Image (tube, rainbow, N blue to C red):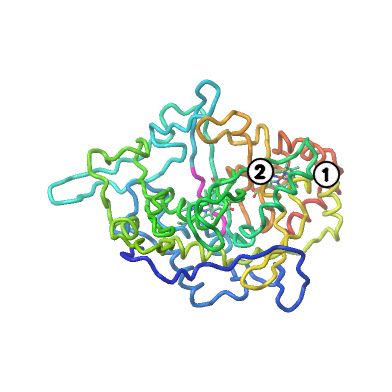
Amino acid sequence: MTRMKLALATMLALPLASAGCGNMNDDSTSQDNFALGDALPGVNATTFAAAKANFNLTETQQDGLGPIFNERSCGACHSVGALGGAGQNIERRYGTLTNGVFNGLASTGGSLRQLFGIGGFNPSPGVNCQSGVDANPAPGATIFAGRVTTPTFGAGLVEAIPDGTIQGIAAAQPASIRGVVTFDTIHLTSGSFTRGTSRVNRFGWKNVHASVADFAADAYLNEMGITTTSCAGGQVVSDFATENRANRAGTNAVINGCPDDLVPGTDDDQAADELNNCAGGVTEVQDDVANFAFFMRALAAPPRGIDNSNGRGLTEFNREGCNGCHVTTTFTVTLNGRSNSFQPFSDFLKHDMGSLGDGIGNDGDSVATTRQMRTAPLWGVHFRNGLLHDARTSDRATAIRAHAGQGAAAASAFSSATAAQQNDLLLFLSSL
Ligand code: HEC
Ligand code: HEC
């Protein structure tokens, strides 16, 4: 959606607040109160409906789609079970090792490939341009990875977990499975987050962002080719304002010989930047990005199913050491003035998963770092199809057996359990 002006109502800030051990009372919610895709209580229904529609809106070249992109709406990928969910799309990532460290092939378009290009376009009469299409696989790639779409149910709850809680889990883990805490520098001032501050990462297969708004702006650019600018204290935030180009570096200022100024289509980066809407100390997030963030922050946690193991599966889950990473902690955070309790079954830390790791990282990362993956939250797993980062299986036992590296001991505990114990564990997983 193209807007020439930023929405002034920065309605989107769900007040995040303290976390603690809230007592269950009338203002408390647990995840069992909702159907998949429901909004948390206290969220304005009209704003939620509008934000949801924006998340599902198909964008066109006129809206700035492209020049290269993977899909035309957030909802085209995030749709399993309900809008905001996981997806069937498996993205392609590539890289290689140069002198033993990761190289994301920036000179040929970066590690994430875009599948489509808008083709020919005319920025002005008589000027014929071509978007080109990213080469798949990337030229020079020796590392090939798939990444399936992750769900965003409960994203606002996860976002509100204090850094110290995640750091405390890591500190308490035995060395053999201790996870890694990584930080991002907040890009967009949104909700309780301020640009420039440091925050513990928690989103994506590899923990690449700490806030929902930052992830939304990143996805708008890298999945759909729509660039944005926002404002922070009167300054233009242009972190998400550079188009991707087929098989070219991110800093390349031309699209196959054509100028990169508001073409193709009208990207959302002109609102703050070129129309000077940040003047006067304004702080606001570009309106589509703000709507996406509002929608995902408002989504309730996925509801639990029935545990047909009569509790034995949980005992087995703990005995096999699954709870070392997929922690059984009930987190409690306050959103919208309400206390919310939820069990995501993740420590939100990255672990060295050995041969299960996807080998993708940032330029300069060691091979060991590229093997690190975020503990996949198991909440909502009974709504999912493809499991593990590349959706290689829909069979839960196969997914467990694929755990290697820090997960190897748990995988072998599962493999050496009796058939009855394995069955109990799988029944328990079906209830998450
Ligand atoms: C082409 C498919 C596709 C489109 C379009 C897409 N996403 Fe995603 N999304 C993904 C994939 C794949 C991942 C996992 C990425 C990873 O971690 O490597 C993901 C992950 C996310 C996450 C992280 C959730 C978590 O905790 O793991 C958020 C938030 C998100 N997307 C928001 C959005 C928003 C907002 C839009 C629209 C602007 C969008 N996505 C468009 C495929 C897509
Ligand atoms: C060392 C930490 C660790 C331990 C221990 C561990 N897991 Fe995992 N688990 C992960 C990570 C990391 C992933 C994501 C790996 C990937 O896809 O690359 C994952 C993924 C999964 C998935 C797939 C979820 C999805 O969204 O695709 C399931 C199911 C799962 N684990 C179940 C288990 C069970 C059951 C056990 C105990 C037998 C267990 N795990 C033990 C870290 C761990």
Label ID, residue 320: 1
Residue of label 2? 181
In the picture, the quarter occupied by the C terminus is bottom right
Describe residue 250's horizontal placement relative to residue 47 as left or right.
left
Quick check: 26 above or below 359? below
Residue 40, relative to residue 422: is it above or below?
A: below
What SS does tag 2 mark?
loop
Q: CA distance from mark 2 to mark 1?
A: 24 Å
- Mark 2 and mark 1 lie on one chain; the one further toward the N terminus is 2
Who is closer to the viewer here, 270 or 111?
A: 270
Tag 2 and tag 1, C-beta contact below 8 Å? no
Q: Nearer the viewer, residue 212 or 88?
A: 212
Q: Position of residue 288 (x, y in %)?
A: 42, 63
Mark 2 CB within 8 Å of ligand 2: no
Determine crowd level at label 2: few under 14, some 14-19, many 20+ residues with C-alpha closer than 10 A. many
Magenta region? 85-91
- Kindly report the secondary structure that dominates the magenta region of the rendered protein: loop
Q: Amino acid at mark 2?
A: Val
Q: For the residue marked with disc 1, what is the amino acid? A: Glu
Which of 413/97 is in front?
A: 97
The single residue placed furthest to the left in the displayed view is: 126
Would you say residue 220 sits in the magenta stretch? no
Please indicate whether residue 41 sits to the left or right of residue 404 in the image. left
Per the rendering, the mark at residue 380 is: none
Q: Residue at x 71, y 48 (%)?
A: 167
Is residue 87 in sight in this rendering?
A: yes
> Within 8 Å: ligand 2 and the Cβ of disc 1?
yes
- Residue 414 screen position, x and y as percent: 80, 42
